[in-house]
Amino acid sequence: MPALLGRPLEVSLTKDSGVAGLIFLIKQHTGRELPKDHAGLQALHAELVAEFDAGRQTAVEWEEVAERVRRLQ
């Protein structure tokens, strides 16, 4: 499919994406593979879940989490 579109597929995070979706997005953009139990990853996921629990309806894009991902140790 990426060859057909002429660009890589892009993932958006929704309330149902879970930690696996976040891991996929990070790997896609940085090449970094984080384990599901990574403390920083879990904290970032919790922040995203809180946004959706507070009423967010739109998907989260890479640009919104990129800086937070860069700070993960």
Image (cartoon, rainbow, N blue to C red):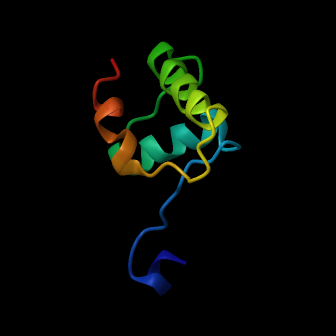
Identify which residue is drawn at 28% across, 35% down. Answer: 67
Q: Which image quadrant for residue 72?
A: top left
> In this picture, is 53 found above or below 59?
above
Q: Residue extending furthest top?
A: 39
> In this picture, is 43 found above or below 68?
above
Q: Nearer the viewer, residue 1 or 43?
A: 43
**Numbered disc total:** 0
> In this picture, is 62 found above or below 42?
below
Identify which residue is drawn at 50% across, 18% down. Answer: 43
What x and y, as percent, mark residue 48? 54, 33
Q: Residue extending furthest right?
A: 16
Relative horizontal placement of residue 27, taking residue 73 as reference (left or right): right
What x and y, as percent, mark residue 40? 44, 18
Quarter of the picture containing the N terminus is bottom right
Relative horizontal placement of residue 33, taking residue 68 as reference (left or right): right
Residue 31 visible in the displayed image: no
Identify which residue is drawn at 61% across, 31% down. Answer: 49
Identify which residue is drawn at 52% across, 57% down. Answer: 11
Q: Which image quadrant for residue 17?
A: top right
Residue 7 visible in the displayed image: yes
